[in-house]
Amino acid sequence: MTITTNRQTAQQRMNDLGKDRRPFIFLIDFEMQQPVVLPLDTIDPEQLQFAIHNYRNDQGRPSATDFHFERHPVSIARYAAAFEQVQKALHDGNTYLLNLAFPTAIDTNLSLHDIFLLSQASYRIWLKGQFTCFSPEPFVRISRGGRIASFPMKGTIDATLPGAEQQLLSNDKERAEHATIVDLIRNDLSMVAKKVRVKRYRYVEAITTHTGSLLQTSTEIEGQLPASFHQHLGDLFFKLLPAGSISGAPKQKTVEIIRSAEGQDRGYYTGVCGIYDGQTVDSGVMIRFVEATPDGLVFKSGGGITARSRMEAEYGELLQKAYLPFATAAAPLL
């Protein structure tokens, strides 16, 4: 079953469904070349399953609860070459912050659907034969009164380290990276909303993984949409994309550098997914992402690079983010 479309059609479909107040789901890839927009009452759960906060059609049981999970990352030499390319762009002033990502080959006895069913995250998506996503990061939420809010998530640390929270909050590189993204998202929201302001700045959240916990910092930024936002949902979302937290600043030039440094399309990884329920919107950034390829499963992950970044630390963060967010009852096999 073909469910993808093109950008122009998807944008108009979101506008039309919003105008009719008809609930729908949307998945928009990073390149915005193969978006999916489907009314909720037309979704075939054999092809697409989702769990986005209170909205879900997930069904079935995993075929395995005990599992093994081994990572085979991109070589440090390949990562270092891309990192140096990004550093040159930073020092040349062509970008101030860039999110650099690579796929990590994984060996596991779990299927994409198993991972989807077992994972714990606010935004879970399974697209048959293609990918599963279990993201903790919101993109934008729109309330009944037209309040729009974004929650950029930047800065990660192992929660078991001594004084982990203070280490994260006091790290100069992480602090500068977070401030840059907050400024970018404020500017993005200002393109579609009025009265844009930072409501909560750099608060800490815990993320559960199959090997332990991580701490991440987020900021809440809000604004006010016009009352007519329902009939312009497609226009609004495509104006905001790609998400600033997983591209960088300035956005257009940084995306060009990303494509050159990474050397491949991201596809749905770091795109956005969301639900419109006829009144409100809840959407997330598709990070924490496992994809099926002809050579097996890969876990796509990355992190923000600034002029202060150290290559070894960024390579380690890329691997740290390749995890499965399972309950401890689903323990890995030894």
Image (spheres, helix red, strand yellow):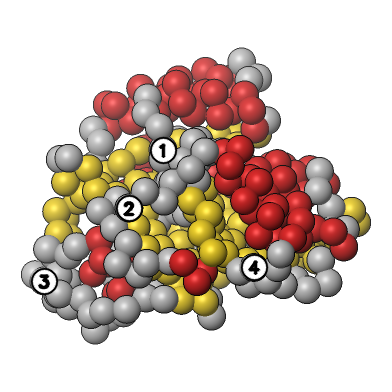
Image check: 332 left or right of 165?
left
Image check: 102 left or right of 218?
left
On the image, numbered disc 3 is attached to which residue?
Answer: 333
Spot occupied by residue 255 in the image (x, y as percentages of width and height): 56, 29
* The quadrant where residue 223 appears: bottom right
Q: Please state which of the two labelled residues, at mark 2 or mark 1, is closer to the viewer.
A: 2
Density class for disc 3 (Cα within 10 Å; few <14, some 14-19, many ≥20) is few
List the single residue furthest toward the bottom: 329
> In the picture, which quadrant includes the C terminus?
bottom left
Distance (Cα) linking label 3 and label 4: 45 Å
Amino acid identity at mark 2: Met
**Residue 1 tag number:** 2
Q: Please state which of the two labelled residues, at mark 3 or mark 4, is closer to the viewer.
A: 4
Distance (Cα) linking label 1 and label 3: 31 Å
Density class for disc 1 (Cα within 10 Å; few <14, some 14-19, many ≥20) is some
Spot occupied by residue 102 in the image (x, y as percentages of width and height): 35, 38
The residue lying at 26 percent from left, 66 percent from top is: 113
Nearest to N terminus: mark 4 or mark 1: 4
The residue lying at 55 percent from left, 20 percent from top is: 89
**Residue 266 tag number:** 1
Nearest to N terminus: mark 4 or mark 2: 2
**Residue 22 tag number:** 4
Q: Secondary structure at mark 3?
A: loop
Viewer-nearest residue: 138 or 328? 138
Q: Please state which of the two labelled residues, at mark 1 or mark 3, is closer to the viewer.
A: 1
Nearest to N terminus: mark 2 or mark 1: 2
Nearest to N terminus: mark 3 or mark 4: 4
